[in-house]
Each structure stands twice: as C-alpha cells, then as structure tokens.
Image (cartoon, rainbow, N blue to C red):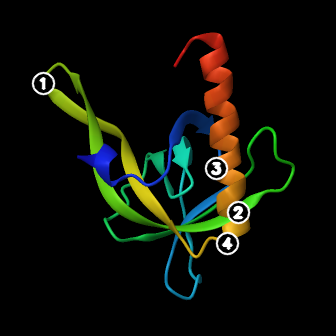
Amino acid sequence: MDAERRQSYRVITRIVPRYAARVDEALSEPVPLDAVILDISGGGALIQSRQLVPVSARLRLRFAVDDDPIEFDVQAIASQVRATPIMAGRVVYIPHYRIHCSFTDVSRRDTERIVRYVYRQQLLLRRRGAL
C-alpha cells in the first residue's frame, strides 16, 4: 500500500545531517535531534533517531549528499514513528526510532536536486547488480 502512494523513487543511503532538530511553526526553540537519514526521495525521508519524535512534529534538517556541493536545508513533518525494540533477556530496550517524514516547503530546485541524487545512486546500484 505504501508503494502505491509513493510519488517519488527512493534510495537506501546513510546521510548524517550536519544539523537536525525538532522545531515549532516559527522555527524557534529547536530541540536537537541525533539523526541519520536511512533513505531519501524527492518527497521525504526515513530517519533513525535515538529521541522519540511524535507524529506530526516539524523537523528541520541540514545535510549534504556526496556528489552535490550545496547543502540542503529542509523542513519535514513526521508522518509515522516506529520504535525498534531489542530484547536482552526479559528486558526490552528501545535503542532508536524510525521516523517516516514528508518534506514541506522545499523549493522545486532542491526537490529536483534530491531526485537527481536518487537517480544517480540507483544507477550505481544497478551497475553493481544490487538492484
């Protein structure tokens, strides 16, 4: 069902944002976020974080992709949050959360840059036989 709703291709990646935070509507009072982007598309990203982010929270991310010298500065809304539990005996630990988010207020130029990055990464994966 998720694949039917997707409007953009995505690629599995590992991007550590230079800056990641939970913000309010006015982009003030940021709450720093320890985050890693696990996959990305022109419309959003899957982020892994140790901090719990509630659904519909607004995020701000600044990151660069390996082959683009200009850094992205995007806002996103958390649409789905899942805990990834680990069992250690009888104790359950939640070491991190997976946050599905949609980009908001992203310029068309930046969206196109992300889509080009995704396309180039998929092309590399196909050449290596991984796709």
Q: Is residue 85 left or right of residue 50?
A: left
In this figure, which residue is indicated by the disc labeled 1?
90
Q: Is residue 18 visible?
A: no
Q: Nearer the viewer, residue 102 or 50?
A: 102
- Which is closer to the viewer, label 1 or label 2? 2
Q: Element type at marker 1? A: loop
Tell me the number on the disc at residue 64.
none
Q: Residue at x 66, y 15 (%)?
A: 127
Relative to 72, residue 68 above or below:
above
* Spatial separation of the CA atoms under disc 3 and disc 4: 12 Å
Q: Nearer the viewer, residue 47 or 69?
A: 69
In this figure, which residue is indicated by the disc labeled 3?
115
For disc 2, the neighbor class at 10 Å (few under 14, some 14 to 19, many from 20) is some
Sooner in the amino-acid sequence: mark 2 or mark 3: 2
Relative to 120, residue 127 above or below:
above
Tell me the number on the disc at residue 110.
2
In this figure, which residue is indicated by the disc labeled 4?
107
Callout 2 amino acid: Asp
Residue 84 in the image: state x and y as whole percent.
29, 37
* Spatial separation of the CA atoms under disc 3 and disc 1: 44 Å
Q: Element type at marker 2? A: helix
Q: Is residue 50 left or right of residue 117?
A: left
Residue 75 in the image: state x and y as whole percent.
57, 69
Residue 8 in the image: state x and y as whole percent.
49, 51
- Which is closer to the viewer, label 3 or label 1? 3
* Spatial separation of the CA atoms under disc 4 and disc 2: 5 Å
Q: Element type at marker 3? A: helix
